[in-house]
Amino acid sequence: MVNTTARKTPATPQLTMAGRHTEATPGQALATIARQAVELLSGPDVPLLKECGNPE
């Protein structure tokens, strides 16, 4: 599911006078999140990921 969603068109940030602005449909927002998940879960920082010890 993550790979399928990551293949869709992501949100496109725009530079404005007020700073960064991003308009996105829900599908574009999910595609952006999925792409970031792929990067995180396959990148060099994977060994740094840990399960939280807090049961709550």
Image: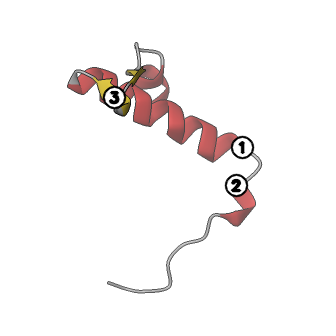
**Image disc number at residue 21:** 3
Outermost residue on the front side: it is 17
Q: CA distance from mark 2 to mark 1?
A: 6 Å
Q: CA distance from mark 3 to mark 1?
A: 27 Å
User: Which residue lies at the image location 62% right of the left edge and 37% below the top edge?
Assistant: 39
Mark 1 = which residue? 43
Cβ atoms under marks 2 and 1 closer than 8 Å: yes
Q: Position of residue 54 (x, y in %)?
A: 42, 86
Mark 2 = which residue? 46
In front: mark 2 or mark 3?
3
Which SS class for mark 2?
A: helix
User: Which residue lies at the image location 22% right of the left edge and 21% below the top edge?
Assistant: 25
Q: Position of residue 55 (x, y in %)?
A: 38, 86
Q: Position of residue 36 (x, y in %)?
A: 52, 37
Relative placement, left or right, of 21 versus 39 is: left
Whichever of callouts 3 and 1 sits on the residue coming sooner in the sequence is 3
Relative placement, left or right, of 29 versus 49 is: left
User: Which residue lies at the image location 60% right of the left edge and 70% below the top edge?
Assistant: 50
Q: Is residue 18 above or below residue 46?
A: above
Q: Is residue 31 above or below residue 55?
A: above
Outermost residue on the right side: it is 44
